[in-house]
Image: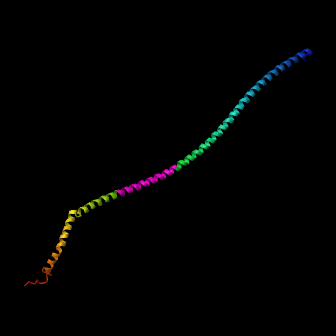
Amino acid sequence: MAPQMSFAQALNEAKGVIVQLSTRVKSDAEKIRSQQQTIVSQSSTIAQHEARATDLEAQLARQLEEVATLTERLRDADSAREHSEMILNRQGEKITTLQAANADLEARLDEHKAQIAELSQERHQLHAQLPSEADAAALVAMSQLLNKAAPAIEKARKSAPQMRLADHDEPIAQAA
């Protein structure tokens, strides 16, 4: 059996256990304080991270709104570009049509110029055939002379024997 302990030994042993437990409690209290500081510091870090995460979420939401706005603007710009391209295509077709019409009109203009040149040449030729002022003056003088001589010519015609042309089957009569 185990020897019996004296009261003093039991108290000393209890005192040793109490000192040992007290040291352990102090050590555990120090660990707890250290862990509490770590928890406080990590809580602060967590709060900072949560605040940063909230800020990042807000920034992300703003950026998503910006992306949505830019996407809408891009869609509008694409629609406007397509509309502009359609207008340009229509105007290009109109220009092509107008250029073709212009080419036709230029061809007709060239034909008309050739026709005008031809008519001008014909007019010059006809103008050259017209009597000149000298010819017109001579014609007037001749006309006046014939008007003056017309009574004398008429008189000579009435006094001249009348001749007639005979058919080649008729015998010719001899004048006696």
x 57%, y 45%: residue: 74
Q: Nearer the viewer, residue 149 or 157?
A: 149
x 15%, y 78%: residue: 155
Q: Is residue 162 left or right of residue 119?
A: left
Quarter-of-image position of residue 51 = top right
x 27%, y 61%: residue: 123
Q: Position of residue 59 (x, y in %)?
A: 65, 37
Q: Position of residue 75 (x, y in %)?
A: 57, 46
User: Was residue 88 drawn as part of the magenta stretch in this picture?
Assistant: yes
Q: Could you tell me if residue 132 is visible in this image?
A: no
Which residue lies most toward the left here?
Answer: 176
Q: Could you tell me if residue 11 is visible in this image?
A: yes
Q: Decide: is 48 above or below 153.
A: above
Q: Position of residue 10 (x, y in %)?
A: 90, 17
Q: Position of residue 60 (x, y in %)?
A: 65, 38
Where the C terminus falls, by quadrant? bottom left
Q: How many marks?
A: 0
Quarter-of-image position of residue 113 = bottom left
Q: Main secondary structure of the magenta part?
A: helix
x 63%, y 39%: residue: 63
Q: How is the image coloured?
A: rainbow
Q: Nearer the viewer, residue 168 or 150?
A: 150
Residue stretch rendered in magenta on the structure: 84-109
Q: Decide: is 108 above or below 156.
A: above
Q: Decide: is 38 above or below 146.
A: above
